[in-house]
Image (cartoon, rainbow, N blue to C red):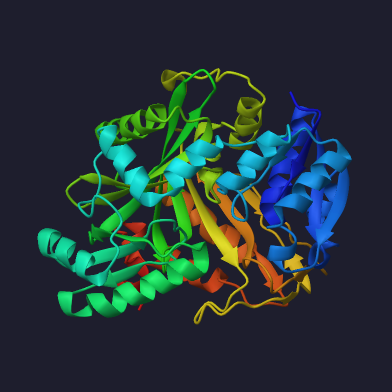
C-alpha cells in the first residue's frame, strides 16, 4: 500500500478521496489553486501545496505542477478524481515515466476508450451491441449525410474525443445536417482540440443506464450492477439511482456480462463505467466507457456496501480483487441528487459566499460536500456543491427519504437547484419510474 497519495482535484471528490485514504492509513497531499486556499480539502489533508492561480489551466490542469508537487512531497501515487486530468492519457503516461503511480487505468486504456470511435470498434469486437451509426469518424457534411441515408433520421452527431455533452448535436432531418455538423465540429475542436465527429442513430425515448466495473492487474473483472442516469439536462446528469426502475434480473445479467466482456477485452484495470442506452423494448446499446470514478458512484456504494475509492487505491497498489461476481448483491434502493450553484430555472451559475448551511441527516442519508458556512463558491470551476444520497428498502421509501432530506437542506447565499430536484421527485412520472433522457423537456416543461 502507498504511504502517501497526492489528490489532483478539488471540492467534494477531493474530500471523498482524503477520507478513504485516512481509513486505509495512507497520508494525503492536497493541491489547491489560489481560489481554493480556504477550501475544506486543504484543511483536512495531511499536507497541502498551492499549484497556481485560480484558472484551472494554470493550476488543476497544469500537469507539470502536479508532478512537481508529488515529487516535492514524496507522494508515490496520484489520484485524479473526476474531471480535470482524470481521463488524460498523456498525464497518466507522464506519471508512469516519473515513477508515480496513476490511480486509474493505463494510459493506453484511457486512450483507447477515450476515443469514442475506437471505443465503438472495440465494443463491436467484443460482441457488445452498439447504436447503429458510422464505423469510423466522418470528415465532412457529405460523409455524415451519407451515413444518415443509411441509418435514417433523426440522428446524433458526436465528438470522437468528446464527453460531457460537448460536440453533440441532434439532427432531425437531412436539411439540417450541414448547420449541425459545422456547429458540433467547431465545439469539439474548442473543447477537445479535435474536430472529428461520428454519427449515431438517435434512439428516443431511451434510458441512460450504466454498469460499474472493477478490474485488477490479474485480469479479474466484476460488475457492481447498474445506475440509471436518465434525468439529465443537455446531457448533464441531475439525478441518479440504483437499481434502475426498468431493470430485470435477466437484463441486469446480460448488460453486466456485456460490460465485463468489454473491460476484459482491453484488460481493464481500476474502476470504470460502461454506459448504455436502453430502449423501451429492452434492447441496450453501448455508448462509451468512462475510465475514472463517476460523480454518481455513491449510489453503487450504498446498494453494494463496496467502497469504490478504496477499491481504486488497492487495485493501483497491485492488490487483487477479493470479490467474485457471486459476492456482489444489491440491497435496497439508492437515489442521488446533484446540488449545483445554479439558478433552477435558467441554470445560470450562481457563485458567491455561503451565508448559512444546514445539512440533512438521519437514517439512510449521506451528503458528500465540501461546503461550510462562510466558504465561497468560486466562478472558475464546475458548479457542483453537494451530492445528497439516500438509501431505503424500496424505491418509494427512497423517494420519500430524499424529499425529507431536501426539505432539511438549507443553503443560503447562492441560488441552488434544490427546487428543481423537488419538482422532479414530485412528478407522477418519476414516482412511477417512467423516465427517459428527455424527461425534463417532455415532463417538466
| Total numbered badges shown on the rendered structure | 0
Instruction: Name the residue at 62% across, 40% down.
Output: 93
Q: Quadrant of the C terminus?
A: bottom left
Q: Position of residue 150 (x, y in %)?
A: 11, 59
- Percent across and percent down for residue 408 are 64, 63
Judging depth in this view, the residue of 290 and 13 nearest the camera is 290
* Residue 96 horizontal side relative to residue 190, left or right: right
At 33% from the left and 38% from the top, the residue drawn is 122
Residue occupying the point 37% across, 76% down:
183
Looking at the image, which residue is at 85% across and 62% down? 37
Instruction: Find residue 378 and report its image quarter.
Output: bottom right
Taking 42 as reference, is 95 left or right?
A: left
Q: Nearer the viewer, residue 234 or 126?
A: 126
Position of residue 438 measured from the top left corner of the image (x, y, whole percent): 32, 66
Q: In this view, does 418 lie above or below 403?
A: below
Q: Which quadrant: the N terminus?
A: top right
Query: Between 283 and 99, which is closer to the camera in this rendering?
Result: 99
The x, y position of residue 12, in whole percent, is 68, 54
Res 213 visible: yes
> Front-most of 1 and 121?
121
Image vertical order of residue 408 relative to residue 128, above or below: below
- Residue 154 visible: no
Question: Which image quadrant for residue 284?
Answer: top left
Report the side of 137 relative to 108 (left or right). Answer: left
Amino acid at each position: 500500500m502507498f504511504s502517501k497519495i497526492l489528490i489532483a482535484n478539488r471540492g467534494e471528490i477531493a474530500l471523498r478521496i482524503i477520507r478513504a485514504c485516512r481509513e486505509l492509513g495512507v497520508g494525503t497531499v492536497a493541491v489547491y489553486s489560489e481560489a481554493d486556499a480556504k477550501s475544506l480539502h486543504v484543511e483536512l489533508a495531511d499536507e497541502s501545496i498551492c499549484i497556481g492561480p485560480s484558472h484551472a489551466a494554470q493550476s488543476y490542469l497544469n500537469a507539470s505542477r502536479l508532478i512537481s508537487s508529488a515529487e516535492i512531497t514524496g507522494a508515490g501515487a496520484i489520484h485524479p478524481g473526476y474531471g480535470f486530468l482524470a481521463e488524460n492519457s498523456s498525464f497518466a503516461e507522464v506519471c508512469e515515466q516519473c515513477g508515480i503511480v496513476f490511480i486509474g487505468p493505463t494510459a493506453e486504456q484511457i486512450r483507447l476508450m477515450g476515443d469514442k470511435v475506437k471505443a465503438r470498434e472495440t465494443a463491436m469486437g467484443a460482441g457488445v451491441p452498439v447504436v447503429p451509426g458510422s464505423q469510423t469518424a466522418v470528415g465532412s457534411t457529405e460523409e455524415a449525410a451519407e451515413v444518415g441515408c443509411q441509418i435514417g433520421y433523426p440522428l446524433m452527431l458526436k465528438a470522437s474525443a468528446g464527453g460531457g455533452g460537448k460536440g453533440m448535436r441532434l439532427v432531425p432531418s437531412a436539411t439540417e445536417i450541414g448547420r449541425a455538423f459545422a456547429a458540433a465540429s467547431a465545439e469539439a475542436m474548442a473543447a477537445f482540440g479535435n474536430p472529428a465527429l461520428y454519427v449515431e442513430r438517435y434512439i428516443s425515448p431511451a434510458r441512460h443506464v450504466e454498469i460499474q466495473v472493477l478490474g485488477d492487474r490479474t485480469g479479474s473483472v466484476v460488475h457492481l450492477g447498474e445506475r440509471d442516469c436518465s434525468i439529465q439536462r443537455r446531457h448533464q446528469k441531475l439525478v441518479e439511482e440504483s437499481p434502475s426502475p426498468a431493470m430485470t434480473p435477466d437484463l441486469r445479467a446480460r448488460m453486466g456480462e456485456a460490460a465485463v466482456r468489454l473491460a476484459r477485452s482491453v484488460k481493464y484495470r481500476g474502476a470504470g463505467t460502461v454506459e448504455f442506452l436502453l430502449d423501451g423494448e429492452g434492447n441496450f446499446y453501448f455508448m462509451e466507457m468512462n475510465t475514472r470514478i463517476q460523480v454518481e458512484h455513491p449510489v453503487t456504494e450504498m446498494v453494494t456496501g463496496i467502497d469504490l475509492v478504496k477499491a481504486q487505491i488497492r487495485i493501483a497498489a497491485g492488490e487483487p480483487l477479493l470479490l467474485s461476481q457471486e459476492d456482489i448483491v444489491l440491497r435496497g434502493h439508492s437515489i442521488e441528487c446533484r446540488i449545483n450553484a445554479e439558478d433552477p430555472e435558467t441554470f445560470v451559475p450562481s457563485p458567491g459566499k455561503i451565508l448559512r448551511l444546514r445539512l440533512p441527516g438521519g437514517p439512510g442519508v449521506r451528503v458528500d460536500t465540501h461546503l461550510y458556512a462562510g466558504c465561497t463558491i468560486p466562478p472558475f470551476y464546475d458548479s457542483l456543491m453537494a451530492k445528497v444520497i439516500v438509501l431505503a428498502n424500496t424505491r418509494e421509501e427512497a423517494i420519500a427519504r430524499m424529499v425529507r432530506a431536501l426539505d432539511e437542506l438549507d443553503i443560503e447565499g447562492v441560488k441552488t437547484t434544490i427546487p428543481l430536484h423537488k419538482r422532479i421527485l414530485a412528478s407522477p412520472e418519476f414516482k412511477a419510474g417512467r423516465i427517459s433522457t428527455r424527461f425534463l423537456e417532455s415532463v417538466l416543461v
